[in-house]
Image: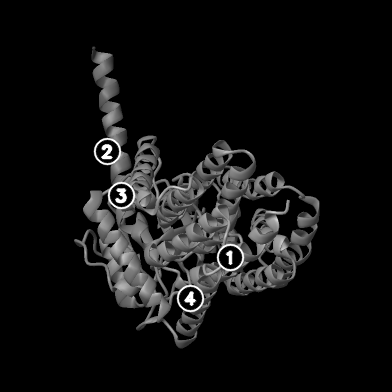
Amino acid sequence: MIRLVALAAIALAVAAGEARAADFRIVVVPGLELADLGRLQQRGAVGLLSPGAGRRTSTALAVASLVRGEVVNSARGAATGPVLVSFETRATTPPGPAIVLALPRGGVQPNDRRYPIAVLGGGYRGLLTSESTRVPGLVTIGDVAPTALGRRDGLGWRPEPDAAASVAALDRRIDDHRAAKLPAMLLTVGLTALLALLFPRAGLLGFPAALGANLGLGAAGATSLWLVLLSIGLAVAAGAPLAALALRSQAALGGAMAAVLAGFLVALAVDGSWIAFSPLGPEQSGRYYGLTNLLETLMLVPALAGAALLWRRVGIAGATGVAALAFVTVAGNRFGADGGGAIVLGVAYAVLIVGLVRAPRRALAVALPAAAALVVAFVAIDAATGASSHVTGAFADGPGGLIDDLRNRAVLSYDNAVASWGAGLAVCASLAGLVLLAAVVFRRALATEDRALLTAYLAAIATSLVVNDSPLDVSLVGLAGFAALVRGTRGLRRL
């Protein structure tokens, strides 16, 4: 008994020591630079700090998030939750235990820079880690308050021989990644649309080809703009036509569509950084891991076309298999973690199945609620296994919280659509083209399977414009994808 009491006392003492060690003060050092992390890594763990989410940041926005431990998209204003911590400002780095960081200085400015952060003392040593980003070395401003309070959801660390050098390399990689994203997207959209006109079957395969090239570049860690554009260009312009010549049956084409989804699922399971730093992956400012709205929209073509093709040749088992694969890849908390994508796929597959089985339109009144129930059930089961992500966060507060989240997404989507004249014109032109093309296509006599596939795709794009906050990506890719499906489905009936 005495021995048990003694062991218990030691355990309590150790726990108390850990708690005291985790009780950090927060110190903002305005002149702190990434170069200073080289000396600070000898005293603790270092990393990059993302100061907020959205297109803009400022001192006021960053401070509001810092003291509340809450990250809010800049389009929605500053964080307004309860204040959890305070901070002090010093010209020099203090002794530990302390969390030392720099913040944006001045008024509203682009949110395109990361800032140095170091956790000194408390047993921290090496590279900072965050469950918010899942990228070693990169943390969010919302991670600071939980760490200062010693909460379990605070920052961790992992050993790293030269953590400061790793942080500097990570910062350069994020900048290169951001610079390549828009050109890579425009190249993909342009080439797939051109193929849809010249070689319709290759236009369909251009989407899995671009996705495969994107995955390969992410796995290789390639961020150079010329290499990204060359790889995606060759994959779409040369790889897709060659694949179209080789795949001579609907079953083979459907299998190729499913294969790219499986490739993403495996990549996300093995190493999420392959997607996080792929050319079309997250920009590392508000969204750090999993699938982006851009990738999810690109995946709609193989996800829906693959299901429709295998329905024709394999039956319902093939279609439901592709649907299940797509849903786990996009919505799984340990994989794509895309809540908006889960809703988009739920609507799309409900419309697709109703069309494929030739049910009357009123069947959607049953199919859509059933799809919603399946989405909620999947997220609940996933969360029950211990997974946590953006998806479980959206569902955590029940139906009311989910409705608020969807309302905020719709507002963000509108705000991003009108963020600039260029973006607004591109979104309007893309949507006008999509509506015009759909009006022309649906005037014609279409096979039942073709009508079901095209209707499901349009339903997916319309849903994505509401529940996702990337209208430019969704509208541009949506137009190219619809053109590829319209042209591609004609030739498929002859296979």
Gap in angstroms between the C-alphas marked 3 and 2: 35 Å
Q: Amino acid at mark 3?
A: Phe
Q: Nearer the viewer, mark 1 or mark 3?
A: 1
Q: Give the label, 4 or 2, closer to the camera.
A: 4
Residue 99: numbered disc: none
Mark seen at residue 431: 4
- The residue that disc 2 covers is 16
Looking at the image, residue 86 sits to the left or right of residue 475; the answer is left
Residue lying at the far bottom of the rendered structure: 421
- 425 lies above or below 348: below
**Residue highlighted by disc 1:** 481
- Calculate the distance from the C-alpha at mark 4 to the C-alpha at mark 3: 30 Å
The residue under the point 61% across, 60% down is 278
Residue shown at the point (44%, 61%) measured from the top left: 459
Residue type (three-letter) at the residue carrying disc 2? Ala
Q: Nearer the viewer, mark 4 or mark 3?
A: 4
Regarding mark 2 in the picture, which secondary structure is present there? helix
Above-or-below relation of 131 to 422: above
Residue 142 placement (x, y as % from top left): 34, 60
> Could you classify mark 1 by the number of other residues whose Cα lies within 10 Å: few (under 14), some (14-19), or many (20 or more)?
many
Q: In the picture, residue 386 is in which quadrant? A: top left
Label 2 crowd bin: few (<14), some (14–19), many (20+), radius 10 Å: few
**How far, Cα to Cα, is label 1 from label 3?**
30 Å
Disc 3 marks which residue?
395
Specify which label sits upstream in the sequence, 4 or 2. 2
| Three-letter amino acid code of the residue under disc 4 | Leu
